[in-house]
Amino acid sequence: MSRAAVSRLARAARAAPAARRHAGGRDPLPVRALALLAGDASAATAGGGVRRPTWFAPMGRLPVGSGGGGLLVPPPPRGLFQFTQPARYSSSSSSQITPGEFTEMAWEGVVGAVDAARMSKQQVVETEHLMKALLEQKDGLARRIFSKAGIDNTSILQATDEFISKQPKVVGDTSGPIIGSSFVSILDNARKHKKEYGDEFVSVEHILRAFTADKRFGQQLFRDLKIGENELKEAISAIRGSQRVTDQNPEGKYQALERYGIDMTELARRGKLDPVIGRDDEVRRCIQILCRRTKNNPVIIGEPGVGKTAIAEGLAQRIVRGDVPEPLQNRKLISLDMGALLAGSKYRGDFEERLKAVLKEVTASNGQIILFIDEIHTVVGAGAAGGAMDAGNLLKPMLGRGELRCIGATTLDEYRKYIEKDAALERRFQQVYCGEPAVEDTISILRGLRERYELHHGVKISDGALVAAAVLSDRYITGRFLPDKAIDLVDEAAAKLKMEITSKPIELDEVDREIIRLEMEKLSLKNDTDKASKERLSKLEADLESLKQKQKNLSEHWEYEKSLMTRIRSIKEETDRVNLEIEAAEREYDLNRAAELKYGTLLSLQKQLEEAENKLMEFQQSGKSMLREEVTDVDIAEIVSKWTGIPVSNLQQSEREKLLLLEDVLHKRVIGQDIAVKSVANAIRRSRAGLSDPNRPIASFMFMGPTGVGKTELGKTLAEFLFNTENALIRIDMSEYMEKHAVSRLVGAPPGYVGYEEGGQLTEAVRRRPYSVVLFDEIEKAHQDVFNILLQLLDDGRVTDSQGRTVSFTNCVIIMTSNIGSPLILDTLRNSTDSKEAIYEIMKKQVIEMARQTFRPEFLNRIDEYIVFQPLDITEINRIVEIQLNRVKNRLRQQKIHLQYTPKAVEHLGSLGFDPNYGARPVKRVIQQMVENEIALGVLKGDFKQDDTVLVDVSSVAIAKGHAPQKKLVLQRLENANLELVAND
C-alpha cells in the first residue's frame, strides 16, 4: 500500500466521531477505509457505506465499530466472495474479527451466517444463523461432532430453522445486516477455548463449545437435544484426538482414517465380507510377514481377478475370529481409499497433509492398525504435482523402520511397471504371489459363495450351475481369470432369473395382449348395425369374458407364487442376520444370548422356512407354476454364449438335426468337393460334441486346388452356418503380407512404432470375435516370417500380440487356401483315362508333395488335414449356374420382378462358362453379360415392369443353309406366369 493511502486511512479514522455525528449515529468511515484496503476507490468516496456489490481481497481486516457503524464482513481466506450488503456491529467490543485468526471452515461459517440472515430476511446476524451455517457445510466438522455425540443433524437443523422462523423479519431496509451482540460474544468465548486447547487458530469445535454459554439460543438448543458440555467435549476429543490446531485447515486431518479408510475388520464383524475359500497358504504367508520386526509389509501380486483383495478380506475375518497369532490379535485392518485421499486436493500440499494425518493416526495406534492399500501402484506418483513429494516417498521411511504395517495388492504388470522401478520402495515390501486357482478350486469357491448370491437375488443356484460356470468360463472366456469370471457368470445368470421372476410371465403377457386386441376390435364393431357385426360382437364379448377370467386366474397364481418366493427370501435374510448375532454373542462370551438365539429364534425361522418351501413345492407340483426359481447349467451356458458368441448351450433337437445334415447345408453353396465338405463337417461336429482338443483350434485345413473351385466359398459357407452371416468370416489376404515389414500388421506394430496402440489386424479381430472362421487366402504368397506366427497359432491355439496380450484361437476354424499344384492337377486330368477316384488319389499325392517342397515341414506338420479340390466338370458347372441365377432372382424380387429359367438355358450358360482352367469364375461373368445386362436394359427401356415375369430360355437361330442352327439365349416377358416349363419353380 502507498504512503498516500496509509495517510488517508489515518485521517479517516481520526475523523470517525465527527462523521458519525453528521451521519445520524452511523459510522461510514470504517467502511470507506475497508473499501480502500480492498482497492475500491469508488466505494471509498461514496458516502454512508458501501451500497453496491464489492469484491474484497481475501485477507481484509474488520475493525468492530464502537456504535454499530456500517462494516462489511470480510470473505474466507481463499478466493473472492461478493457481499451485496454491509454488516454493522451492535457490539461495544473493541476487538477485531480477522480471517487470519480462524480456520478456513470456521471462517466460512462466520461468513455463511450473514448469508443465512439475509436469506431469512433478518437484519441482525445472530448465533442461530451461525449454527445454521456450520450445519450446512458439506462434510462439515460440526455435523461430524454432533453425529459422534449421538445427535441427528437433521433434528438440530430443524430446531435451528424453527428458532430462526420466530425471529422478526425486516423487509425493504437497505442499511444492511447488523452483527448481533450474542454473535460477537460467542466468538470471544471461542477465542478462550482456543487458548484452553493451546491452539493457534479458532476452529469449529471452539465455536461449538462456545454455544454452551450462549444464553440466546445455544443453551436452550442443547437442553432440548439433551446434550451437555461434557458430552460435547468427549465427542470433540474423540474426533480430534490429541492433535493441535496449527494451521488453517485442521478439520481435514481429524478422523483421517475414518474419512479416507474402510475398517475391514468391522465389515467382517458385521458379516459384510464374502467368505474366503482356500488361499490358506497366501494368508499364512501374509501373517508371517506382518509378524516381522522390520519391513513387515507384504505385497500381494497376481493377475486381475484371481482373488488378491480376497486374501486381505480373509485376514480380516481371521482377526475377528481370533484365528491369528498374538502380534495380530485384536488388530484393525483399514483399507485406504486412494481416490478419496486425492479427491479435492487441488492446492499443493493438501494431499500430503491428508496422507500425513492418516499415517500419524496409524503410527499413534502403536501397531493396533494394519493398513491395506489396494492397487498400491497408484501410491507411486500420487499427489506429485508441481514438484511435490509423491505418496510413495512419504511411506518409505515408515515402511522401512517397521512403524507402519502395510499390505499392498497390485497386478503383475503394474508391479513391474511402477513398484520395481523404485528399488527403494520395492525392497520394503515382501512379495506374496497369488496364482489363478484351478477349476476344482474355483468350484469350491463358488460353493462357498452360493448362499450369499442366493440370498441377494432370491433364487436357488444348482450345483450343476456352479460346475458349469467354472468349466465353461475356463474353456471359453480366455481374456480373464478364475475365479472372477466364474463368479460373474453365476451372478449374471442369477440376476437374469430374478428379472424373469419379477417381470410378467409370458403366458400372462400373451393373454393381456389378446384382451387389448379384442377390446379394440369390440370398439370398432360397436357402431355397426348389420347382423354379421352383431354376431361377431356377441362372440367377442364371450371371448373377452373367458379371457378376463383366465387373466384373473393367471394373475392370482403369479402373485401367490411370487409372494411365496419373497417370503422365503425374507426368512433367509432374517436367518442370516440371526446367525451374525449368534457369532457376535459368542465372540463376546454372551452365552445366554447365543443360546437363546440358536435354540429359540433360529429354530423358529428354520421351521418357517421349511413350511414356506413346502408350500412352494406343492404349488409347483400342482402344474400351476409360472416361474422358475433355480439357476441351472443351461442358464450359465446362455450367458457364456451372450458374452462370447460361442454356442455352448445344450444342443437342442433342431441343432442336432442341423449338425447331422451339415454336409447338405454346405453343398447348397459348394458344388462338388465331397471330401472337403465331409472333412469340415466332421471338425464342426467334433467341436459341438465337446470332443475337440481344448488347447488347439477347432480344426486347421489347407485347401489346395485350381482357382475357382470353391475353396474360399467353403469358408464363407461355414461362417454363414455358424453365425448366420458370411460377414463373420475373418479373411486375411496373404498377398498383402509379401513384404517383411508388413508381417507386424498381423499382431500389431512393436512399441515405439506408429500403430502400436491399434493392435494387429488378426489378433484384434479374433479378440473381438473369439468364435470365428479365419481364412488365410493364398497362403503361398505370404512372407516366410508369417509362418513363424502361424506355427504358434496352429500348435498352441494362441498368439501374443504386440502389447503382450494373449489371444486365444481355440474356438476358431483355421482355413488356408493355396493354388499350389494347379497346373499339375489340370495336366493329370487331361492326360489320364483312369476313373475319377483313381485320378484324384494320384493328383492328391503329387500336390501334397509339391506343398512339401514349398512350405517348411514344421508348418505342414501342424495342419490337421490337407484337402485337394478337384476341378469342376460340366455337370457341377450347371449346378453353379442355377445357384447364380437364383441369386439374380432374389435381387430382382426386391424390384418386384420375377425371374424364371428353363433347363436348356442353364445348360447353354454352363457350356459358355465352362473352362477347367478357371473353374466357376467364368460362369459369373457369363451370367452378368448375358442375363443381368439384358434385364437391366429391359428395365430401363420399360420392357420389364413391376410384377412382370422374365423367362430366360434358349432359341435356335439358323445361320446359313447347310449349317446347324446356332443356339441363342433369349429373355422374354411372360403374359401368363403359370407355366410348367421352368426348372427352378
Image (spheres, rainbow, N blue to C red):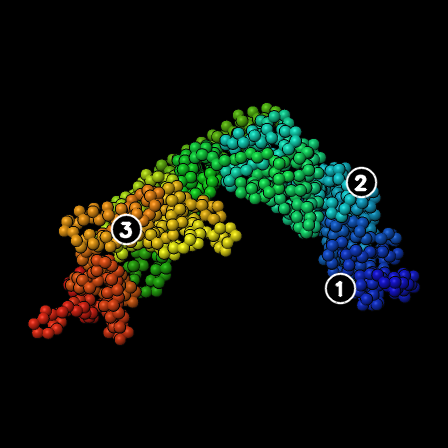
- The residue located at (66%, 40%) in the rendering is 395
Q: Amino acid at mark 2?
A: Tyr
User: Is residue 985 among what the camera can see?
Assistant: no
Mark 3 or 1: the one toward you = 3
How far is disc 2 from disc 3 in space, using C-alphas? 91 Å
Q: Position of residue 511 (x, y in %)?
A: 36, 51
Q: Position of residue 2 (x, y in %)?
A: 85, 63
**417 left or right, relative to 538:** right
Of 754 and 547, the residue lying toward us: 754
Q: Amino acid at mark 1?
A: Pro
- The residue located at (86%, 52%) in the rendering is 95
Secondary structure state at the residue bearing disc 2:
helix
Q: Do residues under tags 2 and 3 come within 8 Å of each other at their CB atoms?
A: no
Task: Name the image quarter holding residue 925.
Answer: bottom left
Up/down of 964 relative to 730, above or below: below
Q: Position of residue 934 (x, y in %)?
A: 24, 70
Q: Residues within 10 Å of mark 3 (few under 14, many from 20)?
A: many
**627 left or right, relative to 284:** left
Of 447 and 287, the residue lying toward us: 287
Q: Position of residue 423 (x, y in %)?
A: 62, 39
Labels 3 and 1: the sequence-earlier one: 1
Residue on which the image places disc 2: 197
Of 547 and 805, the residue lying toward us: 805
Residue on which the image places disc 3: 704
Q: Amino acid at mark 3?
A: Met
Secondary structure state at the residue bearing disc 3:
strand
**785 left or right, relative to 33:** left
Question: What is the number of the mark on residue 53?
Answer: 1
Labels 1 and 2: the sequence-earlier one: 1
Mark 1 or 2: the one toward you = 2
- The residue located at (20%, 67%) in the rendering is 951
User: Is residue 827 among what the camera can see?
Assistant: yes
